[in-house]
Image (cartoon, rainbow, N blue to C red):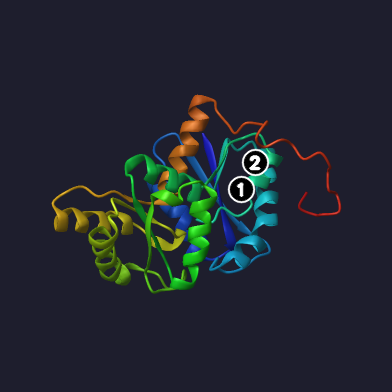
Amino acid sequence: MHIRVIVPVLDSDALVGKAEKEYRSFAGDGVMISAVPLRRGTNSIECGYDSTLAAPEVMRLAREAEKDGVDACTIACFTDPGLVGSRELVSMPIVGEGEAALHMAAMLSTRFSVVITEKPFFSLIRRTVHHYGLSENLASVISADASVLDLNQEHVPHIIAQCIDSVQRHGSEAFVMGCTGTGFDMALMIEESLQTHFGAYVPVIDPGKVALHFARAMVATGLSHSKLAYPKPALPRNEYGFA
């Protein structure tokens, strides 16, 4: 099985190289991982503007992946840029990290919180949650107080403190790491700390890991998105290079 990770930013070891290593670490036996960056885009996605700019390239890469014989793609960004258009253009499964992680959180809890990089991102996260019909499940949005490129394990104690506060004040029962830049084992580190503090298991969801295994499950069961829901575009749109 070959799963391609579309990392919707310009090529860099800080994000693209790290994402590929992370996916390979939890892909499991029999799964080949390839990660591809954008040729045109931004160095990170920090707002809706960045996400919108990434969408055309994401769709191009989805079509390229299908031509390469890839079995499924994931989009390694919580805002899922280009997800709908990609599903219209191809027949193989396309899984967005945000959609996968949020629905997993709703399966594992009745109220969850999203951990994101900085406060200006809050409205975008709330819109993303609303888009997937899960606003009633959203307890809070939490800031790591670091940009995507600066987020690292030094920010974990601050995130843990924010999570504890959200459980106590907002009734959070699970947490979603709302950024591809969370790094190796960050979700697990937070999860273990919450287990120690509350004496009870509180899931902390890594979107990349969940999206990958959703994609694996779709391929293994022979399922993909409905072409009644995501029909092939009626017009070729040759005026756009990516289409």
Number of marks in picture: 2
At horizontal 37% and vertical 46% (from top left) the residue drawn is: 105
Disc 2 secondary structure class: helix
Q: Residue furthest front?
A: 136
> Disc 2 to disc 1, how far (Cα)?
6 Å
Image: 143 above or below 36: below
Q: Specify the amino acid type for callout 2.
A: Arg
Tell whether label 1 touches label 2 (CB within 8 Å): yes
- Residue nearest the viewer, comparing 39 with 207: 207
Image: 186 above or below 33: below
At horizontal 44% and vertical 34% (from top left) the residue drawn is: 30
For the residue carrying disc 1, how many other residues have a C-alpha within 10 Å: few (<14), some (14-19), or many (20+)?
A: many
For the residue carrying disc 2, how many other residues have a C-alpha within 10 Å: few (<14), some (14-19), or many (20+)?
A: many
Residue 98 is situated, as x and y percent measured from the top left of the image, at: 49, 51
Could you tell whether 126 is left or right of 49 in the image?
left
Residue 186 is situated, as x and y percent measured from the top left of the image, at: 32, 59
At horizontal 28% and vertical 54% (from top left) the residue drawn is: 188
The quarter holding residue 106 reads top left
Disc number for residue 83? 1
